[in-house]
Image: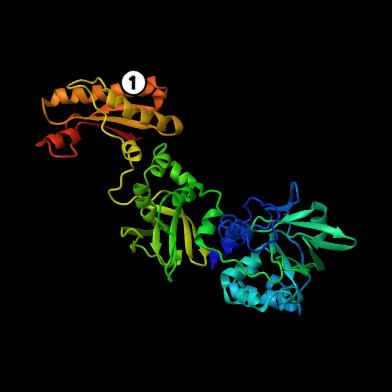
Amino acid sequence: MLERLRRWFSDDAEPHEKDTTWGVPLWWGAVIVALFTVAISWCNDPSDEVIVVAPTTTTTTTAPTTTIAFPPGTPHLVDLIADQPDLTFFRSLITAVGIDQQLSIQGDFTFFVPSDDAFGALTEDVRQAMLDDPVVADQVLQIHVAIGRLRAADLVAAGGVATVVGVVRTVSLDGDTVLVDDSAVLTADLEATNGLVHIIDGVLGLEPDTPPADLLVGDLLAARSDLGTLQTALAAVDADLLASDPAGVTVFAPSDEAFASLPAGSSDVLLATPPKLLELLGYHVVPGTLLSTDLTDGQVLVTSTGEELVVSIADGTVNVGGVAITEPDLTATDGVVHIVGGVLLPAGYTLPTLNDALALDPITFETSSSVITADGVTVLEQAVTFLTENPDVQIAIEGHTDSQGGEASNQTLSEARANSVRDFLIGRGIAADRLEAAGFGEANPIAPNDTADGRAQNRRIEFRLR
């Protein structure tokens, strides 16, 4: 329940453009995923900043730093709403979500509460969907709440307000009537010990007779501005990893920052190597819907690729595959997403080489020499093109030989060939600081040296990410 409250009352999301439609999946995704980290500080310290947003500018006002004295018997928000005879449906949504206790704690919030008549303008199917599905009820509640004790006069002066989902609601005057978007405020500034209620005659963001949209895991991921690399990667693989069975799907989603912690240019090379990318992404997906409270220390999960993923819990932090979950329990109708602070790597997994990504033929040299052949130059031109188009990629050029000849001479030859390739790439305009060269002689064969074909495979240049 605490995790739900953390998601529910976070105010650090960037405001979106005004949006008054139900069926736009991207900002519905933001309902669940953008509401996490600031909640506890708001609940514990009502003296923090309150954001009141005008249509084109953002104005920041500071909440009072002194305790407000309320008359005896002043209710908290839940009781205030329950005491209003025309707010019974909204009160039922609070019960459906199960946050009654959280709404009774210290903190300042402003609710724009649609009247029963406003909900009555919707179809019975829509109203029933809200009551039957806590996720849908949660969505409806969140677009009707803002952080802080925001009086109607202040909202009109500012021209708008950002709800907790980051959606900006225009506030204006029509004669003496205050409008929130197109909904009239019927009763303003109802006082509670932990906030204010404005009763309105419309349901924000929901047109009458329009059914609610399902929030899918894919929509949820797409709504996050910090998951761009993951979204691109999922689109690049020829498989629907997010397709769930009736039990749903659990996604451990690395942030863009997590992908950036891999060797420079890893994302570019992975995108060019679909089999390796699919193997990596599949390790982040587990069949079934597993909330953080379902995970236990030492638990072994089986990923969609059949690999084992071990859970560990220490000092209240849940880790999967040795990587911490930074934002848990972002729920969707077909599963759950946990944001993780690193990229999960299966046991024995190695990032693809440039050779893999480009399906390079062997780079050949003149016999017992570091002089690159014409065929070798043709192959290297492919590497030049890729490195030019992907300037973040940095590579280690590794030279290898077969076992023919002496060990010392093979070591020297492998180093010379690696440096020859490096010099070639630099000569084609690739920055020297993106390239390292090293020789390994005959130490790392990839095939037996007792056949001509095996020895040919062992004589190679590998481009590894560094």
Q: Give the crowd class for mark 1: few <14, some 14-19, many >=20 residues within 10 Å.
A: some
- Taking the image as shown, residue 427 lies to the left or right of residue 71, namely left
Image spot of residue 240 (x, y percent): 42, 58
Q: Residue furthest left?
A: 450
User: Circle 1 is placed at which residue position?
Assistant: 423
Residue 308 image-quadrant placement: bottom left
- Asked whether residue 426 appears in the rendered view, the answer is yes
Residue 146: quadrant of the picture: bottom right
Q: Name the residue located 67 percent from the left edge and 51 percent from the top edge.
A: 15
Quadrant the C terminus occupies? top left
Judge from the rendering whether residue 247 lies leftward or rightward of residue 173; answer left or right.
left
* Residue nearest the viewer, comparing 69 with 194: 194
Give the percent coordinates (x, y) of residue 180. 78, 61
Residue displayed at 57% across by 73% down = 133
Q: Which of 300/174 is in front?
A: 174
Give how far across and how far down residue 100 sits, in percent: 62, 73
- How many marks on residues? 1
Residue at 26% x, 22% y: name it: 372
Which of the pair 456/229 is nearer the observer? 456
Of residue 44 and residue 258, the one placed in the foreground of this image is: 258
Q: Is residue 380 above or below residue 355?
A: above
**456 lies above or below 293:** above
- Percent across and percent down for residue 447 are 16, 39
Image quadrant of residue 125?
bottom right
Left of 163 or right of it: where is 3?
left
Q: How is the image coloured?
A: rainbow
